[in-house]
Image (cartoon, grey):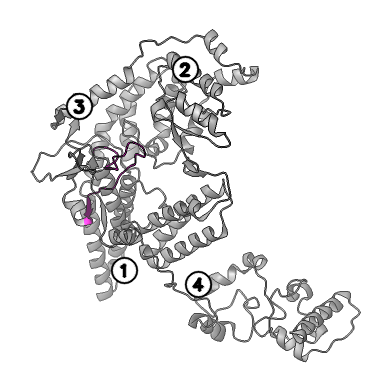
């Protein structure tokens, strides 16, 4: 399996869009039925862009235990369809806010009413043509504009080097500013389309965003075949629209025959809990404008847009103009509207009577809410129950029996200590995110951001519930190191810098930067070394508390600047005067201090304690 994953990554293969049953293979056994998704149609990145409208259909094929696959290549030149409105990141443009303000000024201000939310939607709908026109004028052929701006920048740079002058430098700066602005907009647009929210650092890697956006478009597109309830297949755009409208209208307006309109008394009989008076007042109090604004501005700007096509970023940017109307619409919803809640979690004590009681509650819930719970699709997991009770429950109720451990909310439910099999799925999930073929387009900064934002989030989510074994954490760290330095290849031995004692880089630093001193004794104001070396020196204060030396022969341990004894760093403890008080030079190692220093008695207690530490090391070396 690992070899196959490596093959798909190397060949840049991804799954072609498909529809049909969830599973494509069945073992056809009545007693121990197993169904899995084993059949796939894979295409490379060239086909992804050239045959983006192609799709596959899995359908029953007769006596085989696999489904047959039909591939449809849409190679006809069809008329380009008008896409639904989706707000793009045009906020960086100077014309954005004036366009919104001009339209909003011509509309009526909202007031609290049952239609306030509807009227806000109508105003936003009326704004769409203006924003669509602005987006077309400014973002039309954006990739071409960015490429032309880059070529112009290269020409201007060449002119500056050929004939240096203030005028040539001014033209180059103007070309740079133009390209920078277009590149920023292009990156934001592709980031919005690809939904790669973790890449907040700005990778300037639009090929990565473009491929991710294309994959999302292929996977989320509605295929030109929709199966109706009577088994017929519709293929035209109009017929697909009608079938979609029929399906959602039927689903959203469905009302069971035994539906009972709930009242306050029936709900009180069903639930014995009562809120306190203070809680009741908080539930019915008015929603303030500050609360509405706070909730909206806490939402991530790049969240997926709603059905109207507007993102959270639009509301944040245009808040000074549309904020009052948004607040009125939300407040009217809470005053006049209804907000149903239907999430529920149920536990049982493992007895048959307990399950019967739960099912009665489900039946009552269905009559009151119209929401039916499918018992046939439910799975029952039992632990610590006798075999007789298990059989009695399974024989009397239409539940499927499941086996622990099982994953819930992305985490395994365990009754014992975590084993390799339990955390293997986490490591495979990490490996899969890293080995995605699209990851090869990421730069070093992009890979670092992926590790910090995504990989560490996966690990922290598991750590919030379990104490992951040391082997698991070590394996994830190795994967992160391999991905950071080598990309999706995960070459664990391709580190740019080796930290072993025989590393050429370490030897060079010791020879030319540290010399006879210590890493901790070098001044931050030194002019020797690169900017990266000076950055490392500035981080020493943060690293001191994590650093301690293990003394063996003492030849590589600084006597004054390394933390080798229980007293800490002696240079920090005794200051520069300690060199004279103990008679040990500042560049001495522990080995040199042991060999050349002769113990003396001092009037200062702390100096005698240092003498005792030296004697301990001497005794330990003599014993060895």
**Label 2: element kind:** helix
Numbered circle sitting on residue 365: 2
Relative to 59, does residue 578 appear above or below in the rendering?
below
First in sequence: mark 3 vs mark 2: 3
**Label 1: element kind:** helix
Residue 137, can we see it? yes
Horizontal placement of 425 versus 286: left or right? left
Q: Which residues are magenta?
A: 20-45
Q: Nearer the viewer, mark 1 or mark 3?
A: 3
Question: Which quarter of the image is occupied by the C terminus?
Answer: bottom right
First in sequence: mark 2 vs mark 4: 2
Q: Which residue is mark 3?
A: 228
Instruction: State the residue in front, 221 or 99.
Output: 221
Question: Residue at position x 58%, y 78% from top?
Answer: 526
First in sequence: mark 1 vs mark 2: 1
Could you give the CA–CA distance between mark 1 and mark 4, rounded to whole angstroms?
33 Å
Instruction: State the residue in front, 182 or 464.
Output: 464
Sort mark 3 into few (<14), some (14-19) or many (20+) by Cα contacts within 10 Å.
few
């Amino acid at each position: 399996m690992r070899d196959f994953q490596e093959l798909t990554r190397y060949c840049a293969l991804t799954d072609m869009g498909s529809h049909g049953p969830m599973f494509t293979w069945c073992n056809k056994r009545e007693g121990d039925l197993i169904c899995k998704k084993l059949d796939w149609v894979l295409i490379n990145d060239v086909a992804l862009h050239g045959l983006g409208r192609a799709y596959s259909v899995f359908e029953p094929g007769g006596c085989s235990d696999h489904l047959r696959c039909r591939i449809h290549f849409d190679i006809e030149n069809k008329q380009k369809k008008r896409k639904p409105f989706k707000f793009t990141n045009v906020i960086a443009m100077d014309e954005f806010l004036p366009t919104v303000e001009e339209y909003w000024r011509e509309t009526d201000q909202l007031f609290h009413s049952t239609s306030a939310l509807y009227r806000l939607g109508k105003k936003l709908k009326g704004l769409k043509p203006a924003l669509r026109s602005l987006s077309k004028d400014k973002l039309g052929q954006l990739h071409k504009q960015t490429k032309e701006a880059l070529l112009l920048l290269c020409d201007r740079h060449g002119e500056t080097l050929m004939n240096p002058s203030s005028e040539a430098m001014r033209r180059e700066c103007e070309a740079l500013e133009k390209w920078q602005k277009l590149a920023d907009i292009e990156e934001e647009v592709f980031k919005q389309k690809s939904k790669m929210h973790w890449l907040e650092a700005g990778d300037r890697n639009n090929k990565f965003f473009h491929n991710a956006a294309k994959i999302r478009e292929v996977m989320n597109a509605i295929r030109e075949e929709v199966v109706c309830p009577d088994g017929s297949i519709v293929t035209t755009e109009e017929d697909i629209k009608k079938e979609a409208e029929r399906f959602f209208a039927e689903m959203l307006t469905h009302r069971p025959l035994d539906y009972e309109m709930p009242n306050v008394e029936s709900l009180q009989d069903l639930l014995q809990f009562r809120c306190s008076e203070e809680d009741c007042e908080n539930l019915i109090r008015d929603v303030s404008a500050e609360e509405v604004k706070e909730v909206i501005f806490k939402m991530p700007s790049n969240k997926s847009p709603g059905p109207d096509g507007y993102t959270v970023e639009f509301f944040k940017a245009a808040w000074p103009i549309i904020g009052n109307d948004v607040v009125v619409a939300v407040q009217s919803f809470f005053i006049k509207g209804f907000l149903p809640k239907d999430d529920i979690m149920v536990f049982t004590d493992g007895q048959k009577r307990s399950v019967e009681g739960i099912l009665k509650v489900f039946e009552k819930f269905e009559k009151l809410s119209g929401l039916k719970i499918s018992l046939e699709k439910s799975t029952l997991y039992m632990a610590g129950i006798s075999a007789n009770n298990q059989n009695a429950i399974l024989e009397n109720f239409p539940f499927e029996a499941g086996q622990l451990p099982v994953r819930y909310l992305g985490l395994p439910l365990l009754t014992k200590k975590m084993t390799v099999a339990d955390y293997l799925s986490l490591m495979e999930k990490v490996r899969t995110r890293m080995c995605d073929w699209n990851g090869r387009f990421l730069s070093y900064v992009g890979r670092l951001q992926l590790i910090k934002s995504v990989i560490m989030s996966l690990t922290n989510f598991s750590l919030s519930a379990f104490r992951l074994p040391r082997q698991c954490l070590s394996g994830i760290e190795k994967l992160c190191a391999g991905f950071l330095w080598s990309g999706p290849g995960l070459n664990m031995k391709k580190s740019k810098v080796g930290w072993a004692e025989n590393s050429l880089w370490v030897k060079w630093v010791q020879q030319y930067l540290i010399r006879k001193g210590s890493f901790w004794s070098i001044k931050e104001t030194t002019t020797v070394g690169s900017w990266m070396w000076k950055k490392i020196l500035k981080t020493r204060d943060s690293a001191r508390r994590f650093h301690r030396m293990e003394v063996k022969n003492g030849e590589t341990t600084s006597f004054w600047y390394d933390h080798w004894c229980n007293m800490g760093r002696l240079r920090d403890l005794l200051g520069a005067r300690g060199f004279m008080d103990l008679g040990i030079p500042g560049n001495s190692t522990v080995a040199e201090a042991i060999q050349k220093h002769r113990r003396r008695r001092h009037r200062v207690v702390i100096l005698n304690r240092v003498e005792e530490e030296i004697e301990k090391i001497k005794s330990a070396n003599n014993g060895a």
